[in-house]
Image: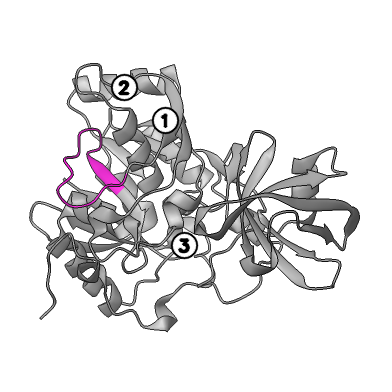
Amino acid sequence: MKDLNPYLLQSYQFDLPPHLIAQFPAEPRDEARLLVMDRQTGEFEDRIFKDIIEYLEPGDTLVLNNTRVIPARLFARKKTGARIEILLLNQENGHWKALVKPARRMPLGTRVFFETSPQVEAEVVAELEDGARLLTFHNCPNEMEFINGVGQMPLPPYINRPAEEDDKIRYQTVYAQSAGSAAAPTAGLHFTEELLERIAAQGINIAPVLLHVGLGTFRPVSSKDIRNHQMHYEYYQIDAKTAYLLNNTKQNGKNIIAVGTTVVRTLETVYNENHGFTAQSGETNRFIYPGYRYRAVDKIITNFHLPGSSLIMLVAAFAGLDNTLKAYRHAVEKEYRFFSYGDAMLVSK
């Protein structure tokens, strides 16, 4: 019998047949499946994602993360010819924080070049924790133009195929605006422009926040006691219009629905019980796991996450660990599709 101590990493493991890991998204986006769970009763419903509108009420506010994924995976070579893979995470003071493979071949001072743009070089200017590197580009007057030209979409490693040109559209929400993420806020991939229009026409508010997805979101939890896990900081922003709308929603007794774990972490970071929501920006390393008391969010739309990840812990903090594991077992039994390109779950109150 599994020990369901919510602080133990082993409590968040589950068996997942490999064929349930989605390699491509549903077409159209809103035809993905949707598992609806009532967190009070633990009851499930099997639906289609576009049915989400039936679980939203006029006056509710649906909150989206409008970050834009950059084609952050670059392939370079050393002068020796050795191939290096670079995953850009975020920009810091004119440099780029990145993961590199193989890291042992990229010590301080190493320079690599790019075959399609051989004049451009990336230099390691610092070695960071977790095998990350700080890079600076040389002979590169417009870095974003260069990255957009040579980079590939950073599909996660469990998608066992090279990124295709179509992934530049598929691995991007239809409402993406502010470039800066190394991974998609995947719960948002299920929305189409038409579905969002229908939602707005029902009197449901739609509000943006921003969190650039980096190492904090997808770094695996390795501590046996999850309380020892340290999240990395990620940049967030909420504007005055969204803050005002969210405060009104709460005052009117309506629901705030977070689309994805990145929105959950942003809203739970910025909400203050004395002052409500306020316009602000900064960095958050908020790690949410069972025992956490939710203050800002009433419902969560999310994908099915990796075993032992901080994301499944966040869901368990909201729905309860037993309910979450039951939902995941149900999803496996009913052959839902898992992870970034997979199906979705709505956890209601």
Q: Name which of mark 2 and mark 1 comes first in the sequence.
A: 1
Residue lying furthest front: 108
Residue 204 appears in which quarter of the rendering?
top left
Q: Is residue 247 above or below residue 323?
A: above
Which residue corresponds to the image point at 32% horizontal and 33% vertical from the top-left?
269
- Residue that badge 1 annotates: 207
Which residue corresponds to the image point at 20% horizontal and 49% vertical from the top-left?
318
Estimate the x, y position of residue 205 in percent, counting from the top left: 37, 29
Q: Which mark is residue 277?
A: 2
> In terms of secondary structure, where does tag 3 sit?
loop
Asked if residue 292 lies in the magenta stretch, the reply is yes
Residue 120 visible in the displayed image:
yes
Q: Are marks 2 and 1 in contact (CB under 8 Å)?
A: no
- State which mark lies toward you, 3 or 1: 3
Q: Which mark is residue 340?
A: 3
Residue lying furthest right: 119
- State which mark lies toward you, 2 or 1: 2
Estimate the x, y position of residue 277 in percent, counting from the top left: 31, 22
Task: Give me the C-alpha separation between circle 3 and circle 2.
Answer: 29 Å
Task: Give me the C-alpha separation between circle 3 and circle 1.
Answer: 23 Å
Magenta stretch in the rendered image: 287-300
Q: Amino acid at mark 2?
A: Phe
Specify whether 304 is left or right of 319.
right
Mark count? 3
